[in-house]
Amino acid sequence: MDTLAVVLEAPERLVLDRVELAAPTAEDVLVAVEWSGISTGTERLLWSGRMPPFPGMGYPLVPGYETVGT
């Protein structure tokens, strides 16, 4: 299973790419995303390369954690 996503590969380098997803399990909910916001805080710092080191946060990164869908 895969999806088409905006991927922040490195500071100031965005690409549209296919991303592999794990198959949903019985405990998961599958949401068809209609809108996804990109934050002007955290993700802006990642875009510019000024994000302080943070565990689990680095490149490549699929931005957008403010998601709306059904």
Image (spheres, rainbow, N blue to C red):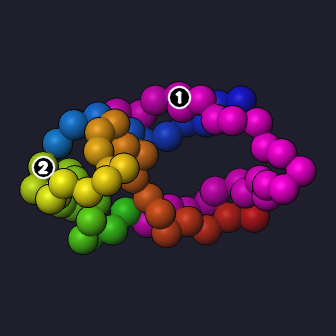
Q: Is residue 16 magenta?
A: yes
Q: Residues within 10 Å of mark 1 (few under 14, many from 20)?
A: few
- In percent of width and height, residue 69 lies at 68, 64
Task: Using the rendered view, name the quadrant where residue 16 is placed.
Answer: top left
Q: State the residue at coordinates (55%, 65%).
A: 67
Residue name at image x 46 percent, y 29 percent: 17
Mark in the foreground, 1 or 2:
2
Using the numbered discs, state the Cα–Cα distance from disc 1 to disc 2 in whole angstroms: 23 Å
Residue at the front extreme of this rendering: 55
Name which residue lies at 31% across and 53% down.
55
Residue assigned mark 1: 18
Q: Which of 54 and 5 lies nearest the eye of the viewer?
A: 54
Where's residue 31, x and y in %?
A: 73, 57
Secondary element at tag 1:
strand
Residue 8 at least partly seen = no
Helix, strand or loop for disc 2: loop
Task: Please name the amino acid that badge 1 sits on.
Answer: Arg
Residue matched to label 2: 49
Is residue 64 shown above or below 7?
A: below
Amino acid type shown at disc 2: Gly
Q: Is residue 1 above or below residue 62?
A: above
Residue 5 spot, x, y in % from top left: 49, 40
7 part of magenta stretch = no
Segment colored magenta: 14-37
Residue at position x 49%, y 69% from top?
Answer: 66
Q: Quadrant of residue 10?
A: top left
Q: Name the side, left or right, on which 54 lies relative to 64.
A: left
- Give the farthest residue toward the right: 26
Q: Earlier in the sequence, mark 1 or mark 2?
A: 1
